[in-house]
């Protein structure tokens, strides 16, 4: 904290201590025409529709804007995903725009110290150094890593910049790590790169199997749908005793990296015990006999004690 900021902080503390400033502006309540009583500082001039950017659930939100600044976040009651609710992450989303630790100017390391510089200087330095590296080692010497938090248009623009501007094909994103295997699995299994289920399924399904997903902590809005479904049997396969695992009827604390073996074992039992719909399979799938002979080599070996299966029935 700079000396000026420290002085300001000290003066504020002293004023509050002496009762000169009771921080009324911070703690007063007022009536918002749309949401009723809320903190006065959050009464907005307008509410703008947007989508929460934290996790992939995609909750619809309204950002309250006052004097051109985001001052509040509320769930959009008309949005089909979250129907007006937000988890704590979404509710605090407007705070990140003005968070004190946020980088607002480019930083360039000079004599070992990160120093604020103008955008002109930052971009000129980047261009000079990138050109110099590519002149010495070839265009492919440059690699770019993007993020799944980019919007579609931004991802498209970055792709064009990397391929046509930088002339390198070394481009990747964090989405490859987390989504490439899922997308490839969807394509191979269902012929489409999107998950075939829907959020409503969580409210109506009889049995729900979650593998390695801790939706109670990570996607609380989805978890609410799960909780609304009182008749479901929830099976959670996860080496960790997560909050979601604690909600399960059956928790399978499998060893890390054994989830595929678990699925193959379940398929083995379903086929072995005739618990499958052969007509449906004949009509809608191909390669079933190859699959059946593959999972034939996955008989369940471990006993329940070894697997430490924890069962809770409601
Ligand atoms: S579950 Fe929470 S973090 Fe995820 S999109 Fe909804 S509000 Fe945002």
Image (cartoon, grey):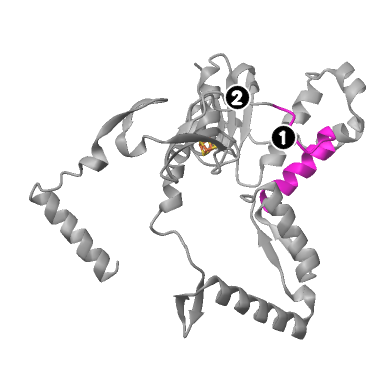
**SS for dot 2:** loop
Rendered view: 296 above or below 161: above
The response on whether ligand 1 sits within 8 Å of label 2 is no
Marking on residue 263 = 1
Mark 1 or 2, which is nearer the eye? 2
Rendered view: 19 above or below 6: above
Which one is nearer the viewer's eye here, 11 or 57? 11
Q: Is residue 297 visible?
A: no
The response on whether ligand 1 sits within 8 Å of label 1 is no
Rendered view: 15 above or below 169: above
- Residue interval drawn in magenta: 177-197
Which one is nearer the viewer's eye here, 162 or 301? 162
Is residue 269 toward the left or the right of residue 221 in the image?
A: right
Task: Check disc 2 and report the residue beneath it.
Answer: 80
Which one is nearer the viewer's eye here, 156 or 285? 156
Total of numbered circles in the picture? 2
Rendered view: 65 above or below 158: above
Q: Residue at x 64, y 55 (%)?
A: 147
């Amino acid at each position: 904290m700079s000396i000026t900021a420290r002085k300001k902080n000290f003066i504020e503390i002293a004023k509050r201590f002496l009762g000169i400033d009771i921080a009324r502006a911070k703690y007063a309540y007022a009536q918002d025409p749309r949401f009723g009583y809320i903190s006065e500082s959050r009464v907005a001039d307008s509410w703008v529709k947007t989508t929460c950017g934290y996790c992939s659930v995609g909750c619809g939100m309204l950002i309250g804007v006052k004097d051109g600044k985001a001052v509040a976040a509320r769930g959009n009651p008309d949005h089909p995903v979250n129907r007006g609710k937000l988890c704590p992450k979404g509710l605090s989303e407007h705070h990140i725009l003005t968070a004190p630790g946020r980088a607002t100017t480019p930083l360039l390391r000079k004599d070992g110290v990160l120093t604020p510089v103008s955008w002109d200087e930052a971009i000129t330095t980047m261009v000079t150094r990138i050109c110099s590296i590519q002149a010495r080692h070839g265009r492919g010497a440059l690699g770019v890593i993007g993020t799944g938090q980019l919007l579609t248009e931004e991802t498209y623009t970055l792709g064009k910049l990397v391929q046509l501007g930088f002339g390198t094909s070394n481009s990747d994103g964090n989405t490859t790590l987390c989504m490439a295997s899922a997308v490839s699995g969807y394509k191979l299994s269902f012929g489409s790169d999107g998950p075939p289920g829907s959020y409503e399924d969580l409210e109506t399904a009889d049995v729900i199997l979650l593998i390695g997903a801790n939706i109670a902590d990570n996607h609380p809005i989805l978890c609410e749908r799960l909780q609304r479904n009182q008749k479901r049997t929830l099976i959670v396969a996860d080496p960790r005793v997560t909050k979601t695992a604690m909600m399960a009827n059956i928790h399978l604390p499998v060893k890390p990296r054994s989830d595929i073996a678990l699925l193959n074992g379940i398929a083995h039992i379903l086929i072995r015990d005739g618990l499958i719909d052969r007509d449906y399979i004949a009509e809608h799938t191909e390669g079933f006999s190859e699959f059946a002979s593959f999972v034939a080599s996955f008989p369940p070996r471990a006993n329940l004690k070894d697997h430490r299966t924890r069962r809770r029935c409601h």
